[in-house]
Image (tube, rainbow, N blue to C red):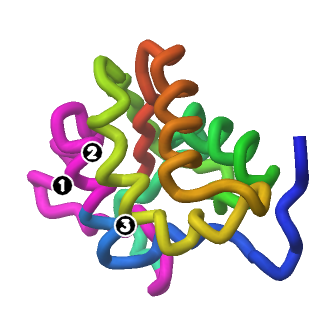
Amino acid sequence: MWCAHSREGRLSLDDPAVRLAYRQLVEPVDPARSWLDTGAVDARFGGDPVPPGAVVRGARDLAELHAIIDDLFGVGCFVRPDPTEGEVVRAKLPVRRPAAVMPFLEALRPQLEHRGPAFWTWKTAREAIAVRLQGLDSLTIEAAR
């Protein structure tokens, strides 16, 4: 296993394309849907100050995918939310086909493709992630407020 160079920094999920891809990925089982339907603010991606009662990402949100990316691209490159307090809801997103996660990974591509061993191409990286995803039954989706 190798380590990411410190100059590479951490992955940012606070990007419009990443936000959209995340929402499309979790939409079928979004545990925060009932909160959002009642008008709660969706502040799952940081950036601006989070208003009280807003929906945020939980500490275990996409934990399985975080572990795969950490293993392949360097430990700690994914920014994880702090442990959440308050009401927490979880759901499992079945991973029937790794292709379902690929739009989210494509949104992260500008940040991921220059990481990893020098001989990697984006195609190689995607294939490695897909192989790891095949071993999963589901991804944890977690939201808190």
Q: Is residue 28 left or right of residue 145?
A: left
Q: What element does badge 3 sit on?
A: helix
Query: What residue lies at 70% left-to-right and 64% top-to-bottom?
Result: 115
Q: Is residue 105 left or right of residue 73?
A: left
In the image, the segment drawn in magenta is 21-49
User: Mark 1 or 3 closer to N-term?
Assistant: 3
Label 1, label 2: how far apart the Cα atoms are = 16 Å
Q: Amino acid at mark 2?
A: Leu
Q: Position of residue 105 (x, y in %)?
A: 42, 53
Q: What element does badge 2 sit on?
A: helix
User: Mark 1 or 2 closer to N-term?
Assistant: 2
Above or below for 19 versus 6 = above
Query: What residue lies at 70% left-to-right and 70% top-to-bottom?
Result: 10
Q: Quadrant of residue 76?
A: bottom right
Residue 53 visible in the displayed image: no
According to the image, label 3 marks what residue? 18
Mark whose residue sits in front, 1 or 3 = 3
Above or below for 84 versus 142 = below
Q: Position of residue 106 (x, y in %)?
A: 38, 59
Q: Is residue 79 left or right of residue 36?
A: right
Q: Residues within 10 Å of mark 2 (few under 14, many from 20)?
A: some
According to the image, label 1 marks what residue? 36
Mark whose residue sits in front, 1 or 2 = 2
According to the image, label 2 marks what residue? 25
